[in-house]
Amino acid sequence: MENPLVLGHESAGVITGVGAAVTNLKTGDRVAIEPGFPCRTCDFCRSGRYNLCDFMRFAATPPIDGTLCTYYTVPEDFAYKLPDTVSMTEGALIEPLSIAVHTVKLAQVAMGHNVLVMGAGPIGLLCCTVARSFGASFVACADVADNRVRFAKEYAAHESYLMKAISPQENAREITSLFGIEQGFDAVIDATGATPAISCGIHALRKGAVFVQAGLGASEIPFPIEQICSKEAVFKGTFRYGAGDYKLAVELLRSRKVSVDTLITDTYSFAHAEQAFNNVVGRNGIKTIILGPGVNLDDDILTC
């Protein structure tokens, strides 16, 4: 990247002005911002898969500036009014929550399913809680970091597993045996992008089940394709979120079927935004909130 770029794409704010054609929002409304605006006219947009639009203008994706600023312009239908019971900090986390909603929907998680989530980072953790809200009877989460494994079980997973320095196949056997899922999981979601985790998840998959790749790592990896074929499993990629995902994420928070407050481990003023980013780079905490320029918590724009 050669030119300066405003960062930020997970945001909530207060409307300071509306255009003449706006009918459903007004000045003073608290909203969560969906930070990607498609063309609305291509085949993908018209079929409801606007996240695949080739002309998407997504915040903080060069050359499009992000949302970490005093004012940000957003189309009416990409600003979602927050219920009175949903805080501004929760509103800022609707973006990653929507990713989890989209992922769990693609995994076809339903009542009574057993679900394995690889990775206890923010997206993995949110996939755990969304899977439970969708009716999964058992959700397990695996990670290489002991502190995140412990947190996953405290937050949303029924059980968690610390990955060992053994083969992916052996880790998969230990997971399915330890949790009594001998036939494999009905759905597996990888939120790491790491080759060993992906391979382990596929080996832990039940025959005929669904594997969803949510984490991004290396562009090309060794892949246990024989497992996908012999199990006649379905492998899906996932990209951001689509029609209805933001709305459902807001409802999950309003109804308290999902909680995100405990994911917020640090809050910084706008003046200390650089320190906030360094905190994230250092893998400290889980989610970091940056207050908008010149505002206090729950006053105005929040970005994470």
Image: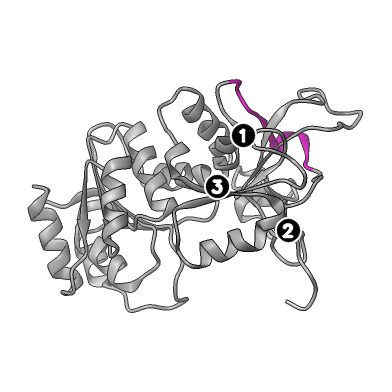
Q: What secondary structure is marked by label 3?
A: loop
The kind of residue tagged 3 is Tyr
**226 left or right of 79 in image:** left
Q: What residue do we see at 19% from left, 58% from top?
A: 204
Q: Is residue 162 magenta?
A: no
Residue 251, horizontal then vertical, whole percent: 51, 27
**9 left or right of 263 in image:** right
Measured Cα–Cα span from mark 3 to mark 1: 21 Å
Residue 59 seen from this side: no
Q: Which residue is mark 1?
A: 88
Residue 138, horizontal then vertical, whole percent: 21, 39
Q: Which residue is mark 3?
A: 241
Tell me the magenta residue range: 74-84
Indicate whether 252 appears above or below 303: above
Q: What residue do we see at 70% from left, 52% from top?
A: 270
Mark positioned earlier in the residue sequence (2 or 1): 2
Indicate whether 185 appears above or below 33: below
Q: What residue do we see at 59% from left, 58% from top?
A: 276
Nearest-to-viewer mark from 2 and 3: 3
**12 left or right of 206 in image:** right
